[in-house]
Image (tube, grey):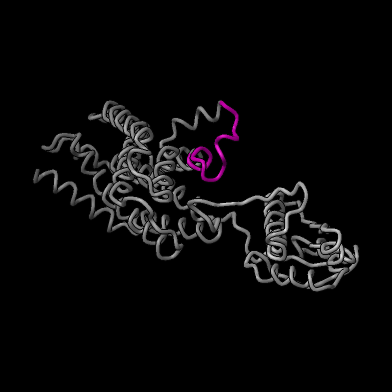
Amino acid sequence: MKQFYSFVRKEFYHVFRDSKTLLMLFGLPIAQILLFGFALTNEIKDSSIVVCDYAKDETTFAITEKLAASSNFKLERSILGAEAIASAFNTGRAKAVVVFPQNFEQSLLHEYHAQVQIITDASDPNTANTLTNYISSIIMDYQRSISPTQKLPYQISTEIRMIYNPELKGVTNYVPGVMALVLLLVCVLMTSVSIVKEKEMGTMEILLVSPINPIWVIISKALPYFALSLLNLTIILLLSVFMLDLPIAGSIFLLFAESALLILAALALGLLISNSTNSQQAAMLISLMGMMIPTLLFTGFMFPIENMPWPLQIISNIVPSKWYYIIVKSVMIKGLGFEAIWKETLILLGMTFFLLFISFKKFKIRLA
């Protein structure tokens, strides 16, 4: 074991002496978690909206104040006329326009019905749909506040309750996805490149003819990245809790155990890639393209898998990060235990053992 520990210590020295490796190990995860957490979000904040108020009564003023008080909107100015509305959209000053017709308050109080027109810029359909829902929700909330007990004929009232994420924070969806992306990508990339680097430098022969078993040589190269990946996971969780305000609802021990399982699968993939390539550039290209694109497409945190054609849905089942993403959301966001994720854990465990078996089976102890 002394020889094994010496090899492990050597690998740690290699990592800490290489600034590029350190940057990729720790700089990439931190940049991704902050980027996805703050910049890439499906939340709508401070969107410019304009109110076109033909009525100018107390009711329209009250609704306008509620719109202005929302953090989702930034109320720019009041305008009148179709030309002014068109100009606001053409110049990009408005994402949405709320139009109150004349005699709005009288229609609401006496006829029990008043119509509001919401005009949105549908060049971005998702934003337009979200803004429409936000504005409609505020208007309905105002209606309930002025007539909480009034029941109109055939009126249907709805009660909306958002569980697990009542504030509709985008980080709730992105953080588990980024965890899957970072752990899989970094582990695969680092393992494959580190082994191929030994081939390029001509030192792989020395390692293989050393007194220690060649399999232990490979394990000694993978072990530092396993430990550093757990450290990466810790950094991501700390950033999520203290910077992105995303608490961990479930067991931290279970979360680390499931993450360790994904890391083992990623290390096996890295070893498999290293057996198929002889240059660092090729290993890096295969790792980046082969891991990043499937994780982004088939994990489910950016694009719903159920909306994809069935052949793509079948392909998504062989991506380890998909099952890890489901596990993280269940444990970290929903606060569920092992009884809720045992199926996904078994699938991930089976993938891990399969990849480890194939990787060690294909590992060449002779380079010639």
Q: Which residue is rendered at x = 76% and y = 64% of the image?
A: 94
Front residue (pair 236, 270):
236
Q: Which residue is rendered at x = 36% and y = 34% of the image?
A: 348
Front residue (pair 106, 356):
106
Q: Position of residue 166 (x, y in %)?
A: 53, 56
Q: Which residue is rendered at x = 71% and y = 72% of the image?
A: 65
Q: Position of residue 134 (x, y in %)?
A: 67, 58
Q: Position of residue 228 (x, y in %)?
A: 29, 52
* Above or below: residue 357 compared with residue 325: above
Side (left or right) of 298 relative to 118: left
Side (left or right) of 1 relative to 70: left
Front residue (pair 364, 139):
139
Residue 246 lies in the magenta stretch: no
Residue extending farthest left: 2
Count of numbered labels shown in the rendering: 0
Side (left or right) of 105 relative to 296: right
Front residue (pair 211, 294):
294
Residue 305 lies in the magenta stretch: yes
Q: Which segment is the magenta one?
A: 295-310
Q: Is residue 86 visible?
A: no
Residue 350 sits in which quadrant?
top left
Task: Give the position of the C terminus as an image quadrant.
Answer: top left
Side (left or right) of 16 relative to 52: left
* Above or below: residue 261 compared with residue 149: above
Q: Position of residue 297 (x, y in %)?
A: 53, 40
Q: Which residue is rendered at x = 34% and y = 54% of the image?
A: 232
Task: Give the position of the N terminus as an image quadrant.
Answer: top left
Q: Is residue 360 visible?
A: yes
